[in-house]
Amino acid sequence: MFISKFSRLGAHAIKNLVKAPSFTPRTSYLPVVHNHFLRTLRQEPFCTAVEKNADEGSEEKQKISVTFVDKDGEEKHIKVPVGTSMLEAAHENDVELEGACEGSLACSTCHVIVMDVDYYNKLEDPTDEENDMLDLAFGLSETSRLGCQIIAKPEIDGIRLALPAATRNFAVDGYKPKPH
């Protein structure tokens, strides 16, 4: 809708420029064209809002079950909205998953271990960048992944993620970022 209104404005301007008398460098035609644009905008309201797709609304409401198992064996069951990373979900639910780089693939402090191979196989393959960071992770295993790269989707509903006993944080002061 916005584009069609904008196109009509362009057509009005071209008509006025064609009708406009020739001008010399001393006369200015810009205010005339500018004022015409403003009048047209005032006459024809337009909206820049975007309608949400019906699928998007249902996807936001859909949640999956995730269980985090800490180094002491204590389990924390949480519901995670589809499309959310496990790092974000952990931060929102007070799970001790560090994520020093805040999900920018610059550290391995959100390292998690997928406890069931079937769930691990349902995840997308790790990228080269993720594999490089996993090489730095403490307690690496065959089913290790970075929590920031595991995105909640219906296929992994019920996934169990173990937190390693320690992380290798390169921050000298032990900085732990807080979720936004």
Image (cartoon, helix red, strand yellow):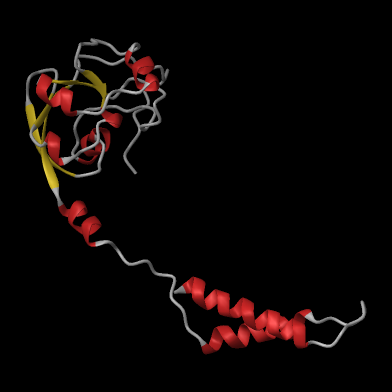
Question: For this view, does 39 lie left or right of residue 45?
Answer: right
Query: On screen, 67 above or below 113?
Result: below
Question: For this view, does 31 lie left or right of residue 7?
Answer: right
Quarter of the C terminus within the rendering: top left
Residue 107 image offset from top left, x and y in percent? 38, 21
Query: On screen, 88 above or below 134?
Result: below
Question: For this view, does 141 lie left or right of residue 104?
Answer: left
Query: On screen, 30 above or below 80?
Result: below
Query: On screen, 56 above or below 94?
Result: below
Residue 52 image offset from top left, x and y in percent? 29, 63
Q: Is residue 115 visible?
A: no
Residue 78 image offset from top left, x and y in percent? 11, 39
Q: Residue at x 55, y 87 (%)?
A: 42
Instruction: Judge by depth and name the residue closer to the eye, 114 or 110.
Output: 114
Question: For this view, does 118 lie left or right of residue 2?
Answer: left
Residue 27 image offset from top left, x and y in percent? 88, 82
